Image (tube, rainbow, N blue to C red):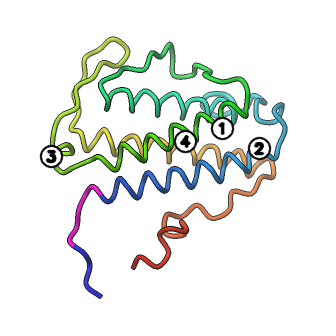
Amino acid sequence: MPNPTFDATRIYVQMARYNTWMNEKLLAECSKTSDEQRKTERSVPFHSLHGLWNHLLLTNKSWLGRFNNQPFPMKSLDEILFEDWDELQAEHARTDALIASFAATLTPEILDSTLKFVRMGEARELPYFLAVSHLFNHQTHHRGQITAVMEQIGLDCGVTDLGAMPMMIGLG
């Protein structure tokens, strides 16, 4: 079967789906342990599972704000947005839906443009495609840290491969 014409925007739609799938799966598994266990200080960036999940949410909101020209106020990269686990999970689900909607709006013209934003008071510019790629790469990076901690405390991460994502099977 011939491959369809390559469209770079499809990559971001698939990465948004993967992001949602992995976050739902890992957050659900993290819910099987106690709040105390999730907040236990560990030798990881952002101090704990809870801290890592908060950081991901914080940075996702920050990038979405940049993409939508509505800056998200952030005090620091380790700022805790939600102490309550259920609230944190619910906000991840809402934010993942926004990321998926955002990814669906991308066009080659947008990806070829330049994103201008302010980070920590400094004006920055990045190729738009690179900023979007970073959004997804950053999440994968920290989910790797999350899964390492999960495995250490006996939680099952299951398969995390992109090709194993249910909506990818059979796409060829």
User: At which x and y percent is residue 21?
Assistant: 56, 55
Which quarter of the figure has residue 82?
Answer: top right
Q: What's the amino acid at mark 4?
A: His
Q: Mark number for residue 142?
A: 4
**Which quarter of the figure is the N terminus placed in?**
bottom left
Q: CA distance from mark 2 to mark 1?
A: 9 Å
In percent of the image, x 60 and y 30: which residue is there? 54
User: At which x and y percent is residue 31?
Assistant: 77, 44
Whichever of callouts 2 and 3 sits on the residue coming sooner in the sequence is: 2
CB under 8 Å between discs 2 and 4: no
CB under 8 Å between discs 2 and 3: no
In percent of the image, x 29 and y 46: which residue is there? 105
Q: Residues within 10 Å of mark 4 (few under 14, many from 20)?
A: some
Q: Main secondary structure of the magenta part?
A: loop
Query: Which-is-in-front pick, marks 3 and 4?
Result: 3
Q: CA distance from mark 2 to mark 3?
A: 41 Å
In percent of the image, x 58 and y 38: which residue is there? 92
CB under 8 Å between discs 1 and 3: no
Which quarter of the figure has residue 112?
Answer: top left
Q: Mark number for residue 89?
A: 1
Question: Residue beneath label 2, please?
Answer: 31
User: What residue span does the magenta drawing correspond to?
Assistant: 5-9
Q: What's the amino acid at mark 1?
A: Gln
